[in-house]
Image (cartoon, rainbow, N blue to C red):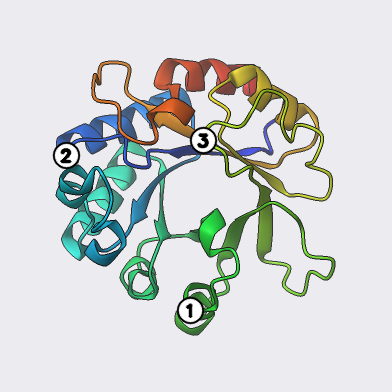
Amino acid sequence: MIRDCFVIAECGVNWRNLHCADKMIRDCAWAGADAVKFQMYNEEQIKDAPDYSFLRHIMLTTDKVAYLYWRCQYHGIEFMCTPMYPGAVDILNPYVERWKVRYDDRENIDIIGRIFDVDKTGKEILISSPEVPKIREWGHIKYLYCVREYPPRKGHGLDDIKGFDGVSCHWPNIDIARYFVKNGARYLEMHVKDEDEDYCPVDNNVSITICELKKLIDWMRS
């Protein structure tokens, strides 16, 4: 039984609208995840993206963040959201219990510094990274091993988790997730998708289904 591994269901951009997001929140809670996570970006960051119109449609505003937070409260699961620009930190601070910093921002002083400025309670900060700093000055900062490839090559990085607190897993494979948990991961972030959703956004090929998530968590808790 592995009860002390904190499981984050990463919805990313695998949702079409707030109704779909609410369903994913409910389903992730049913699967037994500890938290469900979204991403907060701005229009400047997506203006050149091939899926611009779709990404703009689901771009989070303050009102949408509040809605997702309260739906998480209703379904009994922690709300998480990655700030992808400094202003998002201010918006998210009242709603998140811990922070998640993406791989691309692991050394972004504007975002991480803003978290330190805004968050006066010292919430936990999870940072996706390919390596753990040799000197870890802040105990509330946790490092999640992350391979940037979407998805990683077969076998790539499976032996590199020593010293990390957990894994941000881009392998859409629950057997690999089990491997990480067996080898000491205390945080596990898995991208998830809705089985009934036929749209394939950028996160789709690194995601497991909600039923696979439940199968993984049932194995962990049994």
| Image coords of residue 190 (percent x, y) | 52, 34
Say the numbered circle drawn on residue 195: none
SS for callout 3:
loop
Indicate whether 220 appears above or below 187.
Answer: above
SS for callout 2:
loop
Instruction: Quote the CA–CA distance across marks 3 and 2.
Output: 24 Å
| Quadrant for the N terminus in the image | top right
Q: Bin the neighbour count of mark 2 within 10 Å (Cα to Cα): few under 14, some 14-19, many 20 and up.
A: few
- Residue beneath the point at 32% across and 23% down: 194
Earlier along the polypeptide chain: callout 1 or callout 3? 1
Instruction: Quote the CA–CA distance across marks 1 and 3.
Output: 26 Å
SS for callout 1:
helix
Nearer to us: label 1 or label 3: 3
Q: Amino acid at mark 2?
A: Asn
Q: Which residue is mark 3?
A: 150
Nearer to us: label 1 or label 2: 1
Q: Bin the neighbour count of mark 3 within 10 Å (Cα to Cα): few under 14, some 14-19, many 20 and up.
A: some
- Residue beneath the point at 38% across and 28% down: 204
Q: Which residue is mark 1?
A: 110
Indicate whether 159 appears above or below 119.
Answer: above
Q: Amino acid at mark 1?
A: Asp
Earlier along the polypeptide chain: callout 3 or callout 2? 2
Compare residues 173 and 25 and report the one nearer the observer: 173
163 left or right, relative to 185: right
Indicate whether 80 appears above or below 187.
Answer: below
Q: Give residue 93's quadrant in the image.
A: bottom left
Nearer to us: label 3 or label 2: 3
Q: Which residue is mark 2?
A: 17
- Residue beneath the point at 39% across and 71% down: 89
